[in-house]
């Protein structure tokens, strides 16, 4: 007759130490390949969000300029060349001359820069150098991200 303890061992399953080490090694190898891919995906999402935010602000600036050129926003400040004086004007809105308490808003809210996590954008006026990091203060002709990070192709995000 076979002892009871031997019968149990035949039916019990489990992993040997070698099998466990191989399984853990495979798991580590797979996770080490997945981590860079996850970082790349997060970076791409931030880049997409940055492009969308810049497009929203630039479209709002262009709409403001078009309406100001048509004279629908009343008289503009001399030297502004019909561009908004600040970005806040795009969110707060501009009163339409002749209409009571009616404002035109160009943005619902200021988009957030996904890299700096702030709604503080770099601004350029018409008279500023395109590569300048300082704002002349006359008007807002263009915006850029204030991050110092670079895209995978080597271009700074502030040049987008």
Image (cartoon, grey):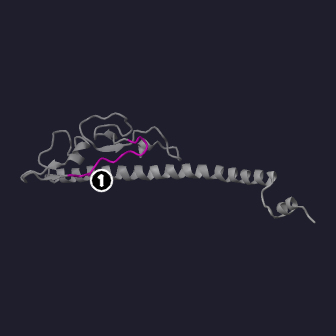
Q: Identify the element where label 1 is drawn.
A: helix
Q: Is residue 94 left or right of residue 35?
A: left
Q: Position of residue 133 (x, y in %)?
A: 37, 35
Q: Main secondary structure of the magenta part?
A: loop
Kindly identify the residue that appears in the image at 53 percent across and 47 percent down.
153
Q: Nearer the viewer, residue 43 or 122?
A: 43
Q: Position of residue 53 (x, y in %)?
A: 36, 50
Q: Which residue is mark 1?
A: 59
Q: Residue at x 36, y 46 (%)?
A: 112
Give the quarter of the image for residue 77: top left
Give neighbour class at mark 1: few <14, some 14-19, many 20+ (Cα, 10 Å): some
User: Which region shows up in magenta?
Assistant: 105-117
Number of numbered discs: 1
The stretch drawn in magenta includes residue 146: no
In this image, 98 relative to 57: left or right? left
| Above/below status of 156 relative to 34 | above
146 w.r.t. 32: above or below: above
* Image spot of residue 15 (x, y percent): 78, 56
The answer to if 106 sits in the magenta stretch is yes
124 in relation to 41, above or below: above
> x, y percentage for residue 17?
80, 51
User: The N terminus lies in which quarter of the figure?
Assistant: bottom right
View extreme (right): residue: 1
Residue at image location 81% in from the left, 64% down from the top: 11
Horizontal relation, residue 56 to residue 97: left or right = right
């Amino acid at each position: 007759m076979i002892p009871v303890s031997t019968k149990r061992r035949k039916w019990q399953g489990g992993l040997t130490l070698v099998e466990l080490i191989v399984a853990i090694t495979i798991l580590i190898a797979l996770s080490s390949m997945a981590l860079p891919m996850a970082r790349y995906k997060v970076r791409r999402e931030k880049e997409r969000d940055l492009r969308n935010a810049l497009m929203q602000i630039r479209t709002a600036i262009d709409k403001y300029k078009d309406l100001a050129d048509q004279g629908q926003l009343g008289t503009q400040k001399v030297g502004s060349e019909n561009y908004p004086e600040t970005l806040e004007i795009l969110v707060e809105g501009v009163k339409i001359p002749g209409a009571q308490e009616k404002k035109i808003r160009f943005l619902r809210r200021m988009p957030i820069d996904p890299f700096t996590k702030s709604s503080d954008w770099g601004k350029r006026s018409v008279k500023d150098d395109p590569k300048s990091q300082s704002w002349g203060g006359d008007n807002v002709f263009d915006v850029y991200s204030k991050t110092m990070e670079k895209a995978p192709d080597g271009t700074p995000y502030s040049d987008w």
